[in-house]
Amino acid sequence: MRKLAAPRRAARILERRLLTLAVRLAAIYGRPRLRAYDPLDCLVETVLSQATSDRNSERAFLSLQAAFPSWSRVALAPPRAIERAIRSGGLARTKSRRIRELLRAVRAREGRLDLRALQRLPAAAAEARLAGLPGVGPKTRACVMLFALRKHAFPVDTHVHRLARRLGLVPARASAERAHALLAPAVPRGRALDLHLNLIRHGREVCRARHPRCEACALRAACPSRGVAA
């Protein structure tokens, strides 16, 4: 019984810490609202966002839409044509093949290039269907779930991963996948969106990867890493 009680107690403590963090960050940055987002658009854009900046991925997404009038045309296009359209997003060769493979998998499974049917499913079922698509990992699934399907999910991107380690929410050497496994179940219901987006904003503006502005950080009193850029 004691072995079972310790993990449960740790999970409750983490949940309370995340709620406190969400409240503090919301007091600084507010609680962002979610715009309407098509699930398939979100899936493609999340693939393009991997290993690059938001600016570059957005430019690549707009370029892809300008080059092809529909996702059906992208699915039929040769990889080199897709690669040329998304070159500004980096890793164009890899991403072009991944996007085409994803689109073809969606069409084969859904009967059309549309993922909006997932909005009607329970969260666990929607996530399982996303997991069945080739190359769709935890972060990509969580992004589509949170931003497009309006379901409870918590993406762990590079900023969230960095802040979670610096704040001691996860072990200092935890991988992004391990951080996701620890954080996602503990995020309080109704706070996933603002906590995720506000952690990203705080990571960009204050708790930067290099030269974090610890002296200006509203979280510094509870941060075990203050003054250390790790």
Image (spheres, rainbow, N blue to C red):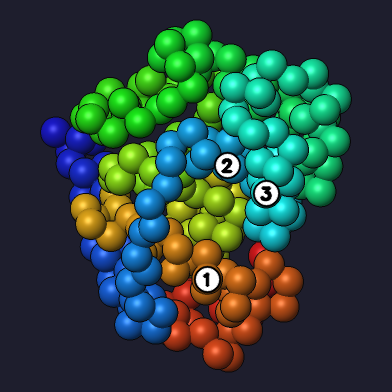
Q: Amino acid at mark 1?
A: Arg
Which callout, 1 or 3, points to the residue nearer the camera? 3
Which residue is located at x 52 percent, y 71 percent?
201
As drawn, which residue projects farthest toward the bottom?
215
Quadrant in the rendering for residue 114 = top left
Q: Residues within 10 Å of mark 3 (few under 14, many from 20)?
A: few
As drawn, which residue projects farthest toward the front?
69
On residue 106, the disc is none
Front one among 22 and 2: 22
Helix, strand or loop at mark 2: helix
How far apart are labels 1 and 2 at the CA level?
18 Å
Q: Residues within 10 Å of mark 1 (few under 14, many from 20)?
A: some
Q: Which residue is disc 1 drawn over? A: 201
How far apart are labels 2 and 3 at the CA level?
13 Å
Q: Is residue 142 visible?
A: no
Q: Amino acid at mark 2?
A: Thr
**In the figure, is residue 68 to the left or right of 192?**
right
Q: Which residue is disc 2 drawn over? A: 46
Q: Vertical placement of 206 versus 125: above or below? A: below
Q: Position of residue 68 (x, y in %)?
A: 69, 33
Q: Position of residue 26 (x, y in %)?
A: 34, 76
Q: Vertical placement of 170 versus 80: above or below? A: below
Q: Quadrant of the C terminus?
A: bottom right
Q: Amino acid at mark 3?
A: Leu
Q: Which residue is disc 3 drawn over? A: 62
Contact between labelled residues 3 and 2, with CB atoms less than 8 Å apart: no
Q: Is residue 4 visible?
A: yes
Q: Quadrant of the N terminus?
A: top left
Helix, strand or loop at mark 3: helix
